[in-house]
Amino acid sequence: MHHHIRNGQYGTHTRHIYDRIPKVENLHMDHLTKLEDITRKLIHVKIKASRIRTRSLTSNTKWKIYLGLDPKIAPEVIAWNYGAKVLERDMLLLIEAVAQHRFETRLMGIGLQIVASQS
């Protein structure tokens, strides 16, 4: 977790999940608001990670030398990690909602084809 912050990443797993979200032009209107919210949260997570890295870089305590992390920053890292996990969950929920919408649309299309063929 701290490793991702230290290397200037907000989490490669988070980015991988975000990249799985369909493009805006392929989303139903109901999902656009959720995507906008997720994008805002993603930027917020990146900003927090950058601030934590900055604080870590300016810290010169002995604890940082021995532990690799200044204990004063640990609560921020924990809060950042929690926020990143919630964001990942929200992204996965959106991906599933989009998939369900597509399946339902296909199912309705099949139903319409059957009705049309019986006419």
Image: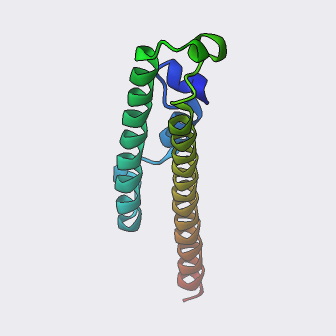
Assign the N terminus to one quadrant of the image: top right
- Color style of the picture: rainbow
Q: In the image, residue 40 lies at what x, y percent?
A: 35, 48
* Vertical arrangement, residue 110 with respect to residue 41, above or below: below
Q: Nearer the viewer, residue 20 or 54?
A: 54
* Vertical arrangement, residue 43 with respect to residue 116, above or below: above
**Residue at far front of view:** 62
Residue at left offset 51%, top offset 47%: 83
Question: On the image, which quarter does residue 71 sit in?
Answer: top right
- Residue 85 is left or right of residue 57, and the answer is right
**Residue at far bottom of view:** 119
Question: On the image, which quarter does residue 29 sit in?
Answer: bottom left
For the image, the number of numbered tags is: 0
Q: In the image, residue 93 lies at what x, y percent?
A: 56, 58
- Residue 45 is left or right of residue 11, and the answer is left
Residue at left offset 56%, top offset 40%: 81
Residue at left offset 58%, top offset 21%: 69
Residue at left offset 37%, top offset 55%: 37
Q: Nearer the viewer, residue 67 or 11?
A: 67
- Residue 100 is left or right of residue 38, and the answer is right
* Vertical arrangement, residue 93 with respect to residue 58, above or below: below
Q: In the image, residue 8 lies at what x, y percent?
A: 46, 21
Assign the C terminus to one quadrant of the image: bottom right
- Residue 43 is left or right of residue 118, and the answer is left
Q: In the image, residue 57 lies at what x, y percent?
A: 43, 15
